[in-house]
Structure formats: C-alpha cells, structure tokens
Image (cartoon, rainbow, N blue to C red):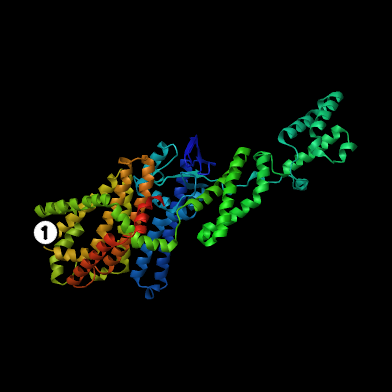
Amino acid sequence: MQQPGAYALSDRQVDVETPEHVSVGYELADLGSRFTAMLIDGLVLALIFIGLLALVVSGAALGLGAIIPGDMVVALFILVWFLASAGYYVFYEGFRDGQTPGKKAMRIRVVQDGGFPVSFRAAAVRNLLRAVDMQPAPSWGFAALTMMLHPRTKRLGDLAAGTVVVRDRTGQPIPEERVADPGAASLGAPRLADPEFAALSMYVQRRAGLEYAVRTQVAGTLMQRLVGRFQGDPRRGQMPADAFLGAIYEEEAARRRASGAGGRAGSPQATALFRRQKPSWDEYDRMLAEARRSGLPAMGERRVSRFAALYREVASDLARARTYGGSPELLFTLERAVGAGHNLLYSAPTSGFGGFRRWVAGGFPALVRLRWRPILAASILLYLPAILTFAAVRQNPAYGRQVVGAGMMQRAEEAEERQAHGKGYVDSEQAGEGMAAFLMTNNVRVTFLAFAGGILAGFGTALVLVYNGVILGAVVGVFANYGANLQLWSFILPHGAIELTAICIAGGGGLWFGSALLLPGRITRREALVVRGREAVSLIGGTAMMLVVAGMIEGFISPSDLPREVKLTLAALFALLLVAYLALAGRDEPARKAAAAAALR
C-alpha cells in the first residue's frame, strides 16, 4: 500500500495519497510553460524597476529634493528594489497559493510534494536557490538541464524545497454544474438506476426496427422490471406500454440532462453527489477563505470545529467523486479544497509577530548553538584563508596587488596622507542612508549566495567563504604593509564583528544544507535536503537580521568623524553584546525545543 504523502508517476501525472488516504492527481507543468512564466515575471520586475526609477526622476524634476534629502531617496530606492527583486517570488508563491503573475498567466502553480499548497518556508528555499539555477547567468541552463533529467521536471530549488510545479485547472467550469435543460430541473432527480436507464434507452432507440409482437413482448418485460419505480403514476393504466415507456424515457433523459450528466461530466452518481453536497462545499469554501485571511485562531473554537468537520466531509466527497468517475474539473476543485484545508489544519501553529519576537529573542541563538559544528567549519573556511593570505601579502607585497583591485591599492597608498589630515578610511560625507542601504543589501546577497552554494554538496558555499577570506586577508595585509592598520580597523571593527559572524552563520547554514547530499543520515538524500534546507533558511533569516544592524553601523558609525578611540570602544561593546546574545539568549526549554523543531515547521 502506498504510504500517505507518497506519490507515483504515470507519464505526466503525479498521483498523491494524502494522510486521509485520499488520492490527489496533478499534471506536471512542461518546460515551455515554466520558462514562459519566468519571462513574464522578469518583465513584471523590469516594469517595477522602471517605475521606481521614474518616480525618482519625476521627484527630482518636481523639486522634491528640497523636501526629501537625496541620500534618503537613494536609500529608499535601493531598499525597495531589493525587497521587490528578492521577495517577489517568495511573496507570490508563499502568500498567493504558489502562483506568481507569470505562473497565473500560464495556469501553473507550485505545490508541495504532498500535493498541498506551498508553505512560505518552502517558497523561500526554492527561490534562494535561483542564484544557482540561473547559471550560467542569465541562461538558466542549469535549471533547464535538471528539469529535463528529473522525472518530475524539478529544478534544484524544487528538490531542496520539496515542491513541484503543476498545471492549474482552477477556475474552469465544472461540467456537473451545467444544466443542459433548465426547464426540466423541476422534474427532480433521476429515478432509474444506470442499468435500468441503459436498458430503457436501448429499447426506445431500437423499437422502431422491431416487429410488433417482439416490441410488445419487450415492452411488457420492461414494464414488469420498472413498475416499482412508477407506483401511483396515473398514465400506467391510460397509455399503452410502448407509449408509456417512451414518455418516461423522455422524462428520465431530461432529468439526467438537468443534473448535468453527459459530455465531459462524470457519471450520474458524481453529478448527484455534486448537487447534493454543493451547499456544504460552498460553506467550506467560505470558511476556508476566512481561515486563510485571518488564521484559524481568530475564528474561535466553535467555527474551527465546524471547519474541521467540513474538511473531513469534503475529503470523503473527493474519495466518492473519484470512485464515481467525476469530471477532471470536479476532481481538481475538490483536490485543491482538500489540500488548502489540510495545509491549514495540519501545519505547525504560528503566532504572528509574537512568534517572530520569540524567535529573535531565543529561537535563533539556540539554533546557532545547536548547529555550531557547520558554523565552526564555515568560520575556518573564512578565517584560515584570510590568515594565510595576510601572511603571504606581508611576506611578498606583490601578492597584494594581484588580489585587491587598483582602487583598494590607491586607498592604501593614500592612507598615510589621509591620516595626516585627520581623515579616516572613507570620507564622512559618504556616510548616511544611501551607503547604509547599499551595504546592507549587498551583504544580505552574499549570505543568500552562501546558502545557495550549499546545494552543490557544500562546495559552492565553501568557495564563497574562501573567496571572501582571501579578499579580507589581502586587504588587511596591504594596509599593514603601508602602516595603516589602525585606520582600517577603526572602520571595519564597529560593524565587522556582527557582519563577519553573520557570514559565518550563513555559511554554516549552507554547509549544513549541503551535507544532506554527502551525509544524509538515516533518511534519504531527498528528504534530508528538504529538512536541512528549511532549517538552514531559519539561519539565513537570522543572519539577514544581523546584517541589517551591521549595515546601519557601517553606514552611520564606521565612516563617521568619531574619534578612533570611540569607534574601537563601540566595536568592543557591539562584539560583547553579540557574544552575550548568541551564547546566553534562548537557554530556556521552549527556545531549545523551537530550535530543534525548526526544520519541521
């Protein structure tokens, strides 16, 4: 027997058995529709960028610069565009039932492997891996290759998130709902069983070719079989058997047309099921919309209990509709309804901002301590190359010129003169909202890349960490060669403790994610990839929070005209606060449990 949540393939079909033992079928989306959807979404993002740029230009033309400082405008532009570009797919797939505008136009959507609506965490995982899937940029060649080779047309993001892209039939008319003969609806439901109606239909269609004696004999036999269905019908004694059978055939055919049978509709049983259960399904749909809009806790115990009862009823109706041979549209509509309800009733409870606050206060640092081994490995991959490169540049200054750019070399060469004039690593005029926004978004992208590299068995993450370590060591070595260590460190240290720690944590998340392919443990590599990917996303979310703080410090404090002693004192204070936060916060039992269960949410 197939286990709940498992799936089987039949050509382009994915059949899923839910925990309620109800089979759900999906048709896989093809490569053409997926890439067309990607192009449409790319066009939408391009229009967003052009719109933001037009707002900035028009604001400058209208003289709004006198009201809003230019640095603030730049910062807002950078932040809004970053949120739009980085969060576009996650927002639509996580909060719009797996459909971006492009996917909606192509009638495809993302669902979980179990057939249920995609979760926000899974949407985040699959879209963070776009950095790898789109390589060689921007051809998306890697994604195309994996989708062609994978039996479920999955790219790397789908593998890591446990998702699949399917065709969407939602919104198409349900044939069982159509009434071909509205005037006959008042006749009521069909009174004959399918075998009885089939026999009557055959007689009526062939009676013209039968001899009178044979037709009379067959009509009498049919009357004996059907007499129980038409007790009390006054026409029985007033009409010949042949005429009576013809009349009841026309009425029965009208009843069946009125119930929607025929054409692409399913069997009469499925049509009768639709007619009988439609009020309950409508009530379920209304409660489902309410639950998805405001959440189950806001509905109250009584309404949640009613919603759960309706969910079980709809799940049973889905099983009946499949048994009765309902139309594809009817089955898909019920499948989507069951999937959405299951996602709400069986998902881990959330508590909105309160849950986020508890995660920041204790869950994230507890998870960092829980995964200290991959984070330590990431720290070694960052700092060991930095130390070795620093030593090499100090021993042979020519190495520094080969690693760092010309602009950095010029800054190091001018360091002594800048110190003589009381200037720091950068001019204080560069400090402000624009610089903070740029640094913040750039550093967050680095952590996203460190996570995405984990899908390559951790080698991509290791490459990002080693590269950044080499650059860090070379820059420090070059400035040391010019005797400008203090100038560099007074700039780096205020934000560096938080920023570099965040990069190490993000790298640890990427390595933990990638270890699923090398050391999956007692579960399959596919399962380990999904579980560890969701946990790594929690680490990435925490590092993004840290980098926002680091970006603010780097934009306002590090380049400021504050005395070096003050900057170094602040750097020590920030470092102590960071150590206390990561080492001491979340020591209570609930926080430890939340960290341990992060991958299961």
Specify the quadrant of the image occupied by residue 425: bottom left
> Looking at numbered disc 1 in the image, what kind of residue is underneath it?
Asn
Percent coordinates x, y for residue 323 in the rendering: 61, 38
Percent coordinates x, y for residue 477 in the rendering: 14, 57
Q: Can residue 241 be seen in this view?
A: yes
Residue sitting farthest toward the front: 589
Residue sitting farthest toward the bottom: 66
Residue sitting farthest toward the left: 395
Q: Give the structural element (helix, strand or loop) at label 1.
A: helix
Left or right: residue 376 compared with residue 143:
left
Residue with the mark numbered 1: 481
176 above or below 226? Answer: below
Tag count: 1
Percent coordinates x, y for residue 322 in the rendering: 59, 39
Specify the quadrant of the image occupied by residue 560: bottom left
Percent coordinates x, y for residue 182 in the rendering: 74, 47
227 or 46: nearer the viewer: 227
